[in-house]
Image (cartoon, rainbow, N blue to C red):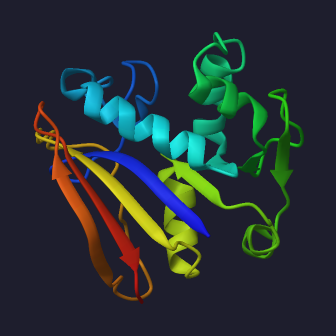
Amino acid sequence: MISVVNFQSLDGVVQSVLSADEDTEGGFAYGGWVSAGMDDAVAEFMRGATLAAGGLLLGRKTYETFAATWASADESEPAVAAMNRIPKYVASRTLTTGAWNNTVVLGTDLVSAVREIPEELVVFGSADLLRTLLAHGLVDELHLLTFPLVLGSGKKMFGELPSPLRLQLEASRTTPSGVNISSYAVVG
């Protein structure tokens, strides 16, 4: 089972959500845009998603950002301890090893490698990886945290897919800061 948990703006932008220098590709100048919408409900949802994960499946850029942040973070917070403990599977054409404990860099046949992973996986961020997983029918659930913000430019979560993606809404709620958390089952 693969679950995706992603922050997006109302116009579907997923680029550089956490900090200004996270991803400036294409001249993107709005990095760190989620901070205004972060509230206790968003934090609790993210904590729960992390604690429920059997492993993380990440693209290289997201992996490197997470490793720089979480590998040396205070493990007194259970979600941080979980992040450091669980397996991390990395889709990368350039990495051969990962320094963050319990890291496995997946080979060139990403789709086959992902199909063989036994753990229930969570994908955070990783837009390029996400499109590959969706194109091959490997995503079971999408948990989208939509922030009440239109950015007008930036990388979008959904790009070209070989066929339409049908979703079934499983749950939806709005946090005090206006973030809509919607959970979908992928049905075809």
2 is higher (above) or lower (below) than 36: below
> How many numbered marks are there?
0
Residue lying at 49% horizontally and 46% vertically, measured from the top left: 49
Residue lying at 72% horizontally and 73% vertically, measured from the top left: 111
The spot of residue 114 in percent (x, y) is 74, 68
27 is higher (above) or lower (below) than 50: above
The spot of residue 149 in percent (x, y) is 12, 38
Residue 34 seen in the figure: no
**In terms of image quadrants, where is residue 183?**
bottom left
Q: As rendered, which of 21 and 139 lies closer to the eye?
A: 139
The spot of residue 123 in percent (x, y) is 55, 52
Q: Which quadrant: the C terminus?
A: bottom left
> Which residue is most to the right?
97
Residue 70 seen in the figure: yes
105 is higher (above) or lower (below) than 115: above
Residue lying at 39% horizontally and 75% vertically, measured from the top left: 185
Q: Which quadrant: the N terminus?
A: bottom right
Q: As rendered, which of 118 and 32 lies closer to the eye?
A: 118
In the displayed structure image, the side of residue 131 where residue 157 appears, left or right: left
86 is higher (above) or lower (below) than 64: below
Residue lying at 63% horizontally and 48% vertically, measured from the top left: 59
